[in-house]
Amino acid sequence: MARLLEIDNLALGFEGSGGLVPALRGISFGLERGECLALVGESGSGKSVTGMTIMRLLGSNARISSGSIRLDGVNLLDLSEAEMRTIRGRRMAMVFQNAKASLNPIRRVGDTLVDIVRAHDRTGISRQDALRKVIGIMAQIGIPMPEHRVRNYPSELSGGMCQRIGIAAALACEPELIIADEPTSALDVTTQQLVMDMLISACRERGVAVIFITHDLALASEYCDRGIVMNGGRILEEGNAVQIFTAPTHPYTRALLDALPYGKTSADELRPMTGNHSDQPEGMKT
């Protein structure tokens, strides 16, 4: 069976006052149905840009110079914006880093979720049936008293609860792929674990593939099947998630692990990352 998602030689940059600034430099990878893939790297490595490019949510100054993004064999880069609107939500969805910022502050969260379901449903689902579906999804991902929570405004919910609402929004239209862009970065450690448990278990039950964008190597190794390490808009290492983050082969991945504070005492010296994303040392050039 063909892969759900296939990205081939994707390169893009952003037009700025000084010319074109490269953001992705010819990356290629695939994603199987039901698979969980981690994209990890420092800020500015290109991981979030990769997710936004797949969703076709880039700004007007983005310039794609080469490559393809195929979902079930269809190149998304060839589709019009109207055609992409039939794919977003229905076939692939995104969980954003700050779910509260992506929710309408003057609308109840239940109304927002119901509108999402009805906008992407092909059967003409009624508002009452859509509400029942929303409540069921909220219950599935562990939101307590969902029949009451649907009446809440975003400001009445905690950051962790808003993140669960964001996950519910992504699951509502039963997509084949969810791109989770650092969905736990703004949460405390305990809430991070709960949110990831809910996201991954719900996707496993439904056979939904996940691209988990993160800088947290521990979460990536715990929840993902495969991992991709990015830097400077390039893929440096790819393979089994546990193997990559316990026995890395690329010097950059080893340097990332050495920079982590885990297992070190206050007297130990951390080894910070050096250089910047414009540097292109040997081993990071195509």
Image (tube, rainbow, N blue to C red):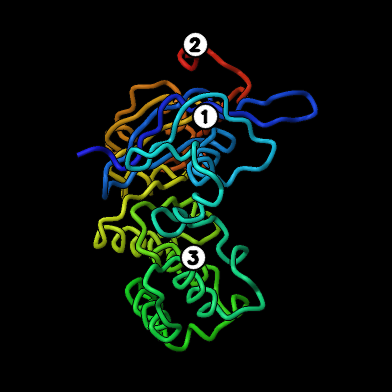
Q: Secondary structure at mark 3?
A: helix
Front-most of 28 and 161? 28
The quadrant in which the N terminus is found is top left
Which amino acid type is marked by label 3?
Gly
Q: Position of residue 230 (x, y in %)?
A: 47, 31
Which amino acid type is marked by label 2?
Glu
Q: Are marks 1 and 2 in contact (CB under 8 Å)?
A: no
Q: Secondary structure at mark 2?
A: loop
Front-most of 3 and 49? 3
Farthest right residue in view: 17
User: How far apart, in angstroms, are the residues tagged by discs 1 and 3?
Assistant: 36 Å
**What is the tally of numbered marks visible in this picture?**
3
Q: Residues within 10 Å of mark 3 (few under 14, many from 20)?
A: many
Residue labelled with disc 2:
282
Q: Residues within 10 Å of mark 2 (few under 14, many from 20)?
A: few
Front-most of 194 and 66? 66
Q: Residues within 10 Å of mark 1 (few under 14, many from 20)?
A: few
Mark 2 or 3, nearer chain start? 3
Residue labelled with disc 3:
166
Q: Position of residue 185 (x, y in %)?
A: 52, 54
Q: Which mark is residue 271?
A: 1
Which amino acid type is marked by label 1?
Arg
Farthest top residue in view: 282
User: How far apart, in angstroms, are the residues tagged by discs 2 and 3?
Assistant: 40 Å
